[in-house]
Image (tube, rainbow, N blue to C red):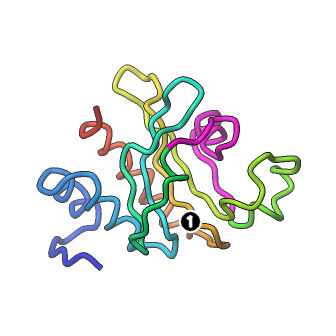
Amino acid sequence: MLDVDLPAPAAAVRSLLASRGIVPALALLNDRTSYRFTAIYKLNGDVMRAAHAFDRDSEYRTWLKVVPLGRSFCQYALEHGEFVTSHASEDQRLTNRPYAGMVESYYGRLLTRGCGTPYGTFIHFDLESRSIPTEEIRFLREVIPQFIDYLE
């Protein structure tokens, strides 16, 4: 857990972004959940590229770097603004999905540039089933837009 001594979690995220950068801020948000991974993926044509990622287990995962959009849960976050599944293998919305056996739980939120065009997604995800409380989703809706000012 990061040792951050600020009165409000949103202020902690803002402070980390300004002073230490994106990955420490992702680590802070990851620490608030049970998800293994927290990342920002950039939309690049028909692929999603990991622009910044935090892995709670600190392992190097090459399969996390580039994911075809059509094989990514990010397609749903891009389309709807937000997407969440706690059990992808049991989620009826995801039948006939081509990415079976990989990510089991996912929370994703669209990141847009100031002009309104999509940058990509902020995501929490895991290979195991995880859930995210409604209160945390509300918090993420508040803080995620702060990241766009720090992305290229």
Left or right of 71 on screen, residue 132? left
Q: Residue at x 43, y 23 (%)?
A: 116
* Disc 1: which residue: 134
- From this view, report whether residue 48 is shown above or below residue 141: above
Q: Position of residue 94 (x, y in %)?
A: 81, 50
State the residue lying farthest toward the top: 115
Q: Position of residue 147 (x, y in %)?
A: 31, 44
Quadrant holding the C terminus: top left
Q: Residue at x 35, y 52 (%)?
A: 143
- From this view, report whether residue 127 is shown above or below residue 34: above
At mark 1, the secondary structure is helix
At label 1, counting other C-alpha atoms closer than 10 Å, the crowd grade (few under 14, some 14-19, many 20 or more) is few
Going by the numbered disc 1, the residue's amino acid type is Thr
Q: Position of residue 35 (x, y in %)?
A: 52, 70
Q: Residue at x 26, y 62 (%)?
A: 24
The residue closer to the viewer here, 138 or 26, is 26
Left or right of 37 on screen, residue 147? left
- From this view, report whether residue 1 is shown above or below residue 43: below
**Which range of residues does the magenta coloring cover?**
66-85
Q: Residue at x 41, y 72 (%)?
A: 56
The verdict on residue 39 being magenta is no
The verdict on residue 83 being magenta is yes
Q: Position of residue 80 (x, y in %)?
A: 64, 37
Left or right of 83 on screen, residue 39? left
Quadrant holding the N terminus: bottom left
The residue closer to the viewer here, 88 or 135, is 88
